[in-house]
Each structure stands twice: as structure tokens, then as C-alpha cells.
Amino acid sequence: MIRVLTPLPVLLPLLGAAAALLVGGRHPRVQRTLSVVVLAAVLAVAVALLLLADADGADAISVGGGRCRWASCWSSTGCRR
């Protein structure tokens, strides 16, 4: 479960920003609502990651297929060596 949640704090704001750009300046209320929903989702994912890391230990996801290094992994609490 933690491997699914780990990249979400990065991906959710990117997707939310893309959706806000698609809405454009025509609907500022929709943009504000979308921003609040994405922020709440990121907060929920962060809390879930904190609880899972506390219960199960740290986990890391390698980006680009290489071995996990500090500059190339998304991690809930840091890379395992």
C-alpha cells in the first residue's frame, strides 16, 4: 500500500495544476474548489504515509529504473541502503 501512496504527494498537485489550467481563468470558484480538494487529498495521503511508515517502516520507489539513490527516489521517510 505504501508503494502506491509514495508518489502521490508529488503527482496530485501536478494533476491539480493541470486541471486548474484546463479550467482557465473563466471559473475562479472552480479553481479554488479544485485547489482545496487537491490540498486536502495531499494532506490525507501524507497522514496515511506517516502512519504506514510508523507501522511498517520506510519504503522508497526508484525513479528511472536505477538503484535507489538520494537524488533518484521518492521516499516516504528516506532511502534504504
Image: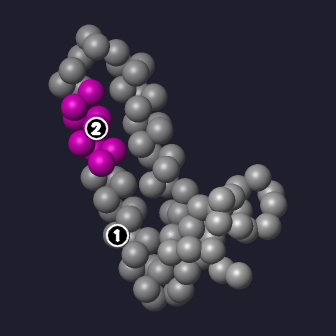
| SS for dot 2 | helix
The magenta stretch spans residue 9: no
State how the image is colored. one colour
Q: Position of residue 44 (x, y in %)?
A: 33, 62
| Residue 58 vertical placement versus 18 (above, below) | below
2 or 1: tag closer to the N-terminus: 2
Instruction: Name which quarter of the figure residue 50 lies in.
Output: bottom left
| Residue 8 vertical placement versus 34 (above, below) | below
Along the viewing direction, whichever of 64 and 30 lies nearer the viewer = 64
| Residue 33 vertical placement versus 66 (above, below) | above
Instruction: Name which quarter of the figure residue 29 lies in.
Output: top left
- Disc 2 marks which residue? 35
Residue that appears at 36% across and 26% down: 20
Alpha-carbon neighbours of circle 1 within 10 Å: few (<14), some, or many (≥20)? few
| SS for dot 1 | helix
Q: Range of the magenta residues?
A: 31-39
- Disc 1 marks which residue? 47
Residue that appears at 65% across and 66% down: 70
Which corner quadrant holds the N terminus? bottom right
Q: In this rendering, would 43 be left or right of 79? A: left
Q: Main secondary structure of the magenta part?
A: helix
Q: Amino acid at mark 1?
A: Val
Q: Amino acid at mark 2?
A: Ser
Residue that appears at 34% across and 15% down: 24
Q: Position of residue 19 (x, y in %)?
A: 41, 28
Q: Is residue 4 visible?
A: no
Q: Position of residue 68 (x, y in %)?
A: 73, 68
Alpha-carbon neighbours of circle 2 within 10 Å: few (<14), some, or many (≥20)? some
Q: Is residue 59 visible?
A: yes
Instruction: Say which mark, if any, is on residue 78.
Output: none
